[in-house]
Image: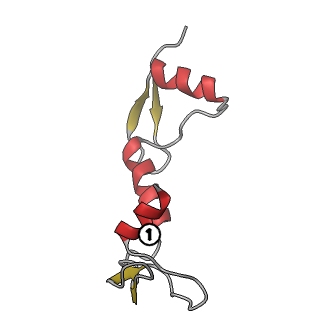
Amino acid sequence: MYEDKTLTCRDCGAQFVFTAGEQEFYAERGFQNEPSRCKACRDARKAARNNASGEPREMFETVCAECGAPTRVPFIPKSDRPIYCSACFAARRG
């Protein structure tokens, strides 16, 4: 039913193949538009969106409320909520 299509990336102008399997996947999910970017440009956009500044995330030092071990978190700790290290957090979730 589906056949491979050659498309042109709107960002870099490179040609890429929109495979029959990808087309079937898009149809199953109800996507109506074909991809307009090659995989490399899609991945670059995702990376830029996830880390817009390009700098490493700022981490904050705190102490685990469960075991007392020093830990680092990517948000400013507040005194009204407990903060857990990775191990204690995982144990509480599991």
Give the residue displayed 47% in from the left and 63% down from the top.
92
Up/down of 15 relative to 50, above or below? above
Q: Nearer the viewer, residue 91 or 9?
A: 91
Measured from the top left, where is residue 11 in percent x and y?
46, 51
Up/down of 48 relative to 70, above or below? above
Q: Disc 1 marks which residue?
A: 51
Q: Secondary structure at mark 1?
A: loop
What is the quadrant of the N terminus in the image? top right
**Tag 1: Cα neighbours inside 10 Å, few (<14), some, or many (≥20)?**
few
> Hey, which residue is sitting farthest bottom in the picture?
79
Up/down of 20 relative to 46, above or below? above
> Hey, which residue is sitting farthest front in the picture?
67
| 35 horizontally vs 61: left or right | right
Measured from the top left, where is residue 12 in percent x and y?
41, 49
Q: Amino acid at mark 1?
A: Asn
Up/down of 84 relative to 77, above or below? above
> Tell me, what colour scheme is on the image?
secondary structure
Report whether residue 48 is seen: no
> Hey, which residue is sitting farthest left in the picture?
69
Measured from the top left, where is residue 22 in percent x and y?
48, 26
Q: Nearer the viewer, residue 41 or 77?
A: 77
Report whether residue 5 is seen: yes
Q: How many marks?
A: 1
Give residue 54's quadrant in the image: bottom left
Q: Nearer the viewer, residue 1 or 92?
A: 92
Give the residue displayed 40% in from the left and 82% down from the top.
64
Give the residue displayed 46% in from the left and 42% down from the top.
9
Give residue 6's quadrant in the image: top left
Give the residue displayed 63% in from the left and 34% down from the top.
33
